[in-house]
Amino acid sequence: MIENREQLRERLLVRLGGFIQGIGLSVEEAREIVDRAIADDPAAAPADIEAKARAWMLIALA
């Protein structure tokens, strides 16, 4: 069964929680980035979406 987008978003936000807190990103900003990473390639593996979101979060800090 394929996980729906909302479940995936929440699971990734939990997994990335320490990272998000460590870089000082707000939960709302992180949620938007995760949503965009999912929308960019919804068929990608969750680990790939997580890696993309993590990279985009670092870019957002620049």
Image: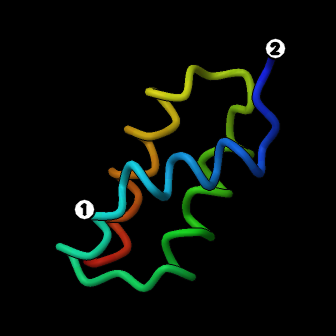
Please say which color scheme the image uses: rainbow
Q: Quick check: marks 1 and 2 in contact, CB under 8 Å? A: no
- Assign the C terminus to one quadrant of the image: bottom left
Mark toward the start of the polypeptide (1 vs 2): 2
Q: Position of residue 27 (x, y in %)?
A: 49, 79
Mark 1 surroundings within 10 Å by alpha-carbon count, few (fewer than 14), some (14 through 19), many (20 or more): some
Badge nearest the viewer, 1 or 2: 2
As drawn, the label of residue 61 is: none
Q: Nearer the viewer, residue 36 or 22?
A: 22
Q: CA distance from mark 1 to mark 2?
A: 28 Å
Callout 2 crowding tier (Cα within 10 Å): few <14, some 14–19, many ≥20: few
Residue, disc 1: 19
Looking at the picture, which amino acid does disc 1 mark? Phe
The structure residue drawn at horizontal position 82% and vertical position 37%, both measured from the top left corner, is 4
Quick one: SS at disc 2?
loop
Up-down: is 52 above or below 13?
above
Instruction: Identify the residue at image location x=50%, y=48%.
Output: 12
Percent x, y of residue 46 = 54, 28
Residue furthest out toward the top: 1
The percent position of residue 5, horizontal first and vertical second, equals 78, 44
Q: Secondary structure at mark 1?
A: helix
Pointer 2 residue? 1
Query: In the figure, is residue 16 to the left or right of 10?
Result: left
Say left or right for 24 vs 43.
Answer: left
- Quadrant for the N terminus in the image: top right
Q: Residue at x 66, y 56 (%)?
A: 36
- Quarter of the image for residue 35 reads bottom right
Q: Does 20 sit above or below residue 43?
A: below
* Callout 2 amino acid: Met
Q: Nearer the viewer, residue 33 or 11?
A: 11
- x, y (%) of residue 17? 35, 63
